Amino acid sequence: MERNCLSCGESMQGRADKKFCSDQCRNTYNNRHNGNISNYMRNVNNMLRRNRRILHEMNPNGKITVHKDKLTEKGFNFKYITHCYTTKKKDTYFFVYDMGYLLLERDFVMIVARKPEDAITEKKKLVTT
Ligand SMILES: [Zn+2]
């Protein structure tokens, strides 16, 4: 039975379940099909990295309150966070890795820093309880 390579379309011989004429064609095909999700993930990762950098730059001493506009001006995107944490007082902190923020009244934002180790412990606690 003759089949065609799913990537380049060349006819090929061999096992019935063979889909590609070469490893190169397999890679090309897979890259093409995974490209969209890879690009998307790369973009999200870049957004998260940028958000984290902005929070870190704005908050060199561990805690600060700024207006939301200051963050937006720098390119901060409020859509991209890694996790959130609600305290007993029902305040929800949004985190970008180890940098968190709490939305305050009149569009102010309090930025806090968390030791990465603590952030991980916290997550574990949330999962197990
Ligand atoms: Zn091929």
Image (tube, rainbow, N blue to C red):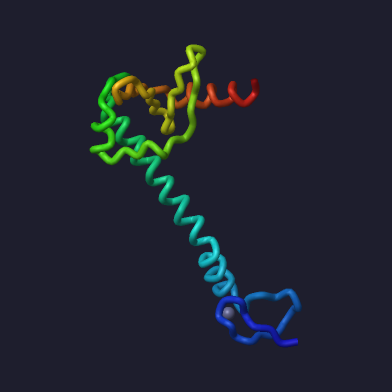
**Along the horizontal axis of the image, is 33 left or right of 47?**
right
**Residue 30 drawn above or below residue 116:** below
- Looking at the image, can residue 36 be seen? yes
Q: Nearer the viewer, residue 14 or 106?
A: 106
For image coordinates 37% across by 40% down, the residue present is: 49
Q: Position of residue 80 (x, y in %)?
A: 42, 39
Q: Nearer the viewer, residue 103 or 100?
A: 103
Q: Position of residue 76 (x, y in %)?
A: 31, 38
Quadrant location, the N terminus: bottom right
Q: Nearer the viewer, residue 106 or 129?
A: 106
Q: Quadrant of residue 91?
A: top left
Tell which residue pokes out farthest to the front in this image. 106
Q: Quadrant of residue 103?
A: top left
Ligand 1 located in image quadrant: bottom right
For image coordinates 34% across by 20% down, the residue present is: 104
Q: How many marks?
A: 0
For image coordinates 55% across by 73% down, the residue present is: 24
